[in-house]
Amino acid sequence: MATLAQKLAKQAGSYVRCSQTLSLPVTAVANTDYAQVFLPTGAINVTYRTYTTTAYTAGTDAKISIGSTAGGVDYVAATTIAAIGVKSHTPVDAAAAVHLAPGALGFFVRVTQSGTATAVGAATLVFDFSVPVS
């Protein structure tokens, strides 16, 4: 019996939904930048979710931002992720064209702590995207 992936691979012009994760621990600094994340060539329709598993204990807040450059907010504006829970992030309007255009996509992710920065807090960022089946 064919697997779902095998069935999709036989349908030219089809897309398959994929995910990639990035761990988001912090250090006791205001800005924690993570290694640039690249999605496969042809990835489109990117969405983002953060699963905060250990609450960030910064003095005021902990926010995630995602952009095309370090500290950039041109994909996802700064959004709080301080409390334990799941947060779906809405891409900024200007990112729509990038998220629907085929090509290799690179993302810079930053967690900014305001108030007193602490080394307490952890989350996982999930990138969901579609790739063409060849």
Image (spheres, rainbow, N blue to C red):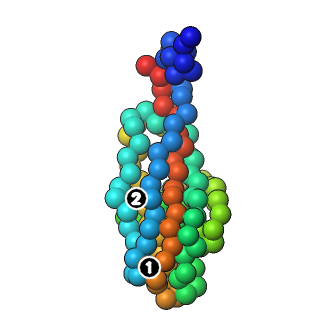
- Residue at 51%, 42% in the rendered image: 19
Which label is found at residue 67? none
Q: Which structural element holds mark 2?
A: strand
State if disc 2 and disc 1 touch (CB < 8 Å). Answer: no
Q: Which mark is residue 119?
A: 1
Q: Residue at x 57, y 21 (%)?
A: 4
Residue 56 image offset from top left, x and y in percent: 54, 75
Percent from the top left, x then y, of residue 95? 53, 51
Q: Under tag 1, what secondary structure?
A: loop
Instruction: Give the x, y percent position of residue 33.
Output: 38, 67
> Quadrant where the C terminus lies?
top left
Q: Earlier in the sequence, mark 1 or mark 2?
A: 2
At label 2, the amino acid type is Phe
> What amino acid is at disc 1?
Ala
Quarter holding residue 28: bottom left
Q: Is 81 on the left or on the right of 24, as rendered?
A: right
Q: Nearer the viewer, mark 1 or mark 2?
A: 1
Q: Is residue 84 visible?
A: yes
Q: Nearer the viewer, residue 130 or 82?
A: 82
Residue extending farthest to the left is: 35
Q: Which residue is labeled 2 in the image?
A: 108
Q: Is residue 25 above or below residue 108?
A: below
Q: Residue 97, can we see it?
A: no
Count of number-bearing discs? 2
